[in-house]
Image (cartoon, rainbow, N blue to C red):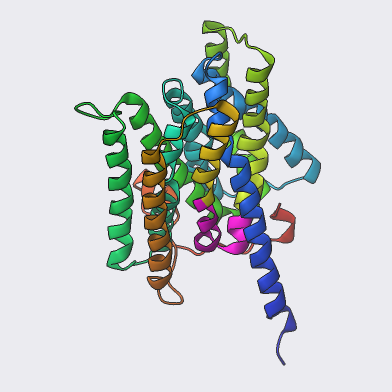
Amino acid sequence: MRDESSVTAPGSVTAGRAAGLALGALGVVGFSMSLPATRVAVQQLDPWFVAFGRAVGAALLAGAYLWVVGAARPTRDQWRRLCVVALGVVVGFPLFTSLALRHQSSAHGAVVITLLPAVTAVFAVLRAGERPPRPFWLASAGGLLAVLSFLAASGAVHGGPSPADLFLLAAVVLCGLGYAEGGALARDLGGARTICWALLLALPVTVPVTVLAGVAHPPTADATTWAAFGYLTVVSMFLGFVAWYAGLARGGIARVGQVQLAQPVLTLVWSALLLGERVTPASVAAAVVVLACVAVIQRSRQAGRPARGARATPLAGLVSGVRVPAVLPRRSRSSNRG
């Protein structure tokens, strides 16, 4: 007799994917304002305070959420993977974008950020043990070349990349790492609990740095700057990730990851409308070329999936250099999802 509990109705699968795409799109809309908000915040606040202070504020929201739902503690393996998430999206991306946007426009940053879907896909490939076809790697290299060409043509490179551009590239790499590992981990923990535990895990780093930055440069700013900081805390650092990781878990990293294609376009729009920044034809052209490369990456990645039964390797093992047992994400009990 067949166990009906193990059978998933096609309608429920379709609904789950649709919900994943909707949640992913909601997260991208929230993230698309991150660079303009950061650009506003760092004009009057210390970039270290902006980067780590928003993580501390979001951790307060995360702790309250976990307490209300009575969330179970992650396992030892999940803690290791949460370290990767925290490194990428709680510490790395906020810090390097804050440092970069002190000297660069958010429109300029948006062009570099167009690489993010490609970097996320590369890390997802590493994690899943996939062997993508040659077009995947050619398109990845093409996207990177397009961004570097844009930086050179825009005058940002004079004998070498500027520190701001290096910060942006570092932010993209770390964020792609955090996106890929967090999206996979959310299948076990749920989207909300993944970012919540990562925020709490980072507190031993984010709290001292926030205090030191606040003492060195006491935070004084106008209402607009504090509003931008509040947006980064509540939306960019918390609510956006709740929606994004939930979307990746329900709709799949490859499928929902394509929604990221809209993020740099939206960021360019916000930069022009809200900050009055000039969006040059070179910026638009570079963004279009990179997005085309990302589209090729996503298509070729679908063609290069491992055979059924192939196992995934958590990125925590790749980053730490320690060989970890390759395991597929486990289905957790309903009490451990959020």
Q: Residue furthest right?
A: 68
Q: Is residue 179 visible?
A: yes
Q: Is residue 124 above or below residue 242?
A: below
Nearest the camera: 58 or 160? 160
Q: Position of residue 38 (x, y in %)?
A: 54, 27
Residue 163, by quadrant, is top left
Residue at the location (62% across, 60% down)?
A: 21
Give the left or right position of residue 204, taking residue 309 as reference: right
- Residue at the limit of the structure toward the left, as seen here: 159
The residue positioned 53% from the left and 13% from the top of the image is 213
Chief secondary structure of the magenta portion:
helix
Q: Of all residues shown, which one is farthest toward the bottom?
A: 1
Residue positioned 29% across, 53% down in the render? 142
- Residue 252 in magenta stretch: yes
* Quadrant position of residue 6: bottom right
Q: Residue at x 53, y 12 (%)?
A: 212
Q: Position of residue 326 (x, y in %)?
A: 43, 62
Residue 88 to residue 3: above or below: above
- Residue 63 at what x, y percent from top left? 71, 35
Q: Is residue 8 visible?
A: no
Does 156 lie within the magenta span?
no
| Nearest to the observer: residue 129 or residue 151 | 151
Left or right: where 288 falls relative to 37? left
Segment colored magenta? 247-261
For the N terminus, the image quarter is bottom right
